[in-house]
Every structure is written in C-alpha cells, then in structure tokens.
Amino acid sequence: SKFLNDKWMIKHGFLNDVQEHKPWWWNIKVQKLNLSAPLILLPEVSCQKAIEILQEKGYDQAPVVAESGLILGMVTLSNTLTSVLAGNAQFSDAVTKVIYDQFSKIGLEDSLGKLSCILENDHFAIVVHEQMQFNGNGSSFMKQMVFGVVTAMDLLTFVSRNDKK
C-alpha cells in the first residue's frame, strides 16, 4: 500500500511532483533555506560529553558521523538525557548507544516540497551533499557530506518570511 501513497513515493524519490495545487515554495531548492553548518559528533564521544557540547553550543541535536564520513545517526539532547535517566545508557557510554539510526536524508538540490513530505513523518532531515573523492590509487567514490539539519521550524520560518501572499 505504500506504493499507492504519493507522500511515501515522493519521500523515497520515486515521484517528483504530485501535488496539483502546489504552494509557491514547493519547487524551491533546499539550499535556499540558508542553513547554518551543523555541529557534528564523532561516534566515540561519550553521552556526558555530548550533553555538555549540545548545551554549551545551544543545539538540541547533532549528527553522529564516523571519521570515514558515514552518517551513523542523530543524537538528541532529550533522548540522551532520557536514556541515561532511565538507566538504558550510562554517562560514560559512547553516544552511539543513544542515537537515532532511522533518519531521512535530503540533498541541497531537492525541493522544499520533498522536504515537506519528509517532515510530515520525521522531526528532522539531514541535509547532505554528495562529493566525489579520489584515493591515492586514483579510484573514486561518492562521499556524502553533512551540510545541515533541517526541521519543520526551518521550513515554516522560510515560508513565513518569504510568503508572497
């Protein structure tokens, strides 16, 4: 039945334009949101240190990215605190114990319409940009770079500031 759901199809890249009466912002690219660079945590950061960093820097969440560039998931302040207080994790545990590993990614060139479909079910999306990298032997591979984290509030702020009505 998910293949009959247009929003699922858009979110997973199988459909581009579905909405017949699209709002003015529907086809604008994600890059127009002017997101600030995200705070990124490495997987060995402890839960205690993650809490301290997020609070000190004023962030609610941060992507956890391996040295290789692989995006492992997202750590949130509330989930980390809840996990530690419930005894499911220790302050000394690596942040990977409390990350959300189910997350959506969206590219800078994707539309705000696609982002809107993602944000109907997810609290955030990780904005990625693919970059070709070359090894010493000349072989290449695509690497995803985390460009930002976008929430429904970011989309709402953009739409309300730029509303053409």
Image (tube, rainbow, N blue to C red):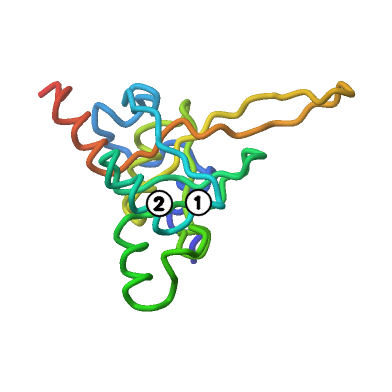
140 sits to left or right of 40: right
Q: Quadrant of residue 17?
A: top left
Task: Report the disc number at residue 60.
Answer: none
As shown in the figure, which amino acid type bears the numbered disc 1? Val
Q: Residues within 10 Å of mark 2 (few under 14, many from 20)?
A: many
Up-down: is 99 above or below 125?
Answer: below
* Camera-side residue of 155 and 146: 146
Which percent across, then down, holds residue 143? 66, 33
Disc 2 target residue:
50
121 sits to left or right of 101: left
* Camera-side residue of 141 and 78: 78
Residue drawn at (39%, 28%) of the image: 37
Which percent across, then down, holds residue 84? 37, 70
Disc 1 target residue:
45
Residue drawn at (31%, 26%) of the image: 33
Q: Secondary structure at mark 1?
A: loop
As shown in the figure, which amino acid type bears the numbered disc 2? Ala
Up-down: is 118 above or below 46?
Answer: above
